[in-house]
Amino acid sequence: LLTDAPVDNQGKGEGFSPTDLVGTALASCILTIMAMAAERHGIALEGSTARVQKTMSSSGVRRIAALEVWITLPAGLDEEQRRLLQRAAAGCPVKRSLHDAVPMELHWS
């Protein structure tokens, strides 16, 4: 895995930045934890996706200022199944690790 800093931070922007990988870790962790819950409860999760947007600080120390994740669940899930998957996502270890350091918002569709 090759990483590079973004062009606006002395890099060439030719690879993933370490902060991009933090966002990717959050999205993939959410999907992984939901898949584990879905398997335990016999819920078909095929077709689910997660898209993450990372916002960097614009002043002061360079850091991740916010992470937003848009999670799309398969059509046909009932409300109880959706709630179960949302609770599972809230327990994602990456989300819990970042909780006090980075504002995060999950959007569901």
Image (tube, helix red, strand yellow):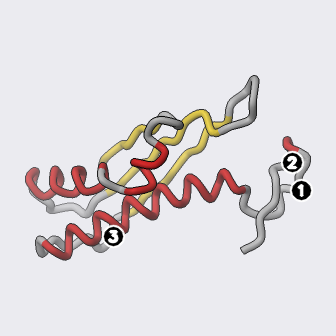
Q: Point out residue 40 in the picture as x, y percentages from the top left corner.
A: 15, 74
Q: Identify the element where label 1 is drawn.
A: loop
Q: Point out residue 37 in the picture as x, y percentages from the top left corner.
A: 21, 67
Position of the N terminus by quadrant: bottom right
Q: Point out residue 102 in the picture as x, y percentages from the top left corner.
A: 52, 37
Estimate how packed mark 2 is, as few (under 14), some (14 to 19) or many (20 or more) residues with alpha carbons within 10 Å: few
Q: Point out residue 77 in the picture as x, y percentages from the top left corner.
A: 14, 60
Residue 12: image tag:
1
Say whether disc 1 or disc 3 marks the residue closer to the N-terminus: 1
- In three-dimensional space, the C-alpha distance between marks 3 and 2, rounded to whole angstroms, equals 34 Å
Say which residue label 3 marks: 47
Which residue: 30% across, 53% down?
91
Which residue: 88% across, 52% down?
11
User: In the image, what residue type sits under mark 2?
Assistant: Val
Say which residue label 2 marks: 7
Q: Nearer the viewer, mark 3 or mark 2?
A: 2
Horizontal relation, residue 61 to residue 65: left or right: right
Q: Nearer the viewer, mark 1 or mark 3?
A: 1
Asked if the residues shown at circle 1 and circle 2 are in contact, with their CB atoms under 8 angstroms apart, the answer is yes
- In three-dimensional space, the C-alpha distance between marks 1 and 2, rounded to whole angstroms, equals 5 Å
Asked if the residues shown at circle 1 and circle 3 are in contact, with their CB atoms under 8 angstroms apart, the answer is no
Estimate how packed mark 3 is, as few (under 14), some (14 to 19) or many (20 or more) residues with alpha carbons within 10 Å: few
Relative to 81, residue 35 above or below:
below
Say whether disc 3 or disc 2 marks the residue closer to the N-terminus: 2
User: In the image, what residue type sits under mark 3?
Assistant: Gly
Q: Identify the element where label 3 is drawn.
A: loop
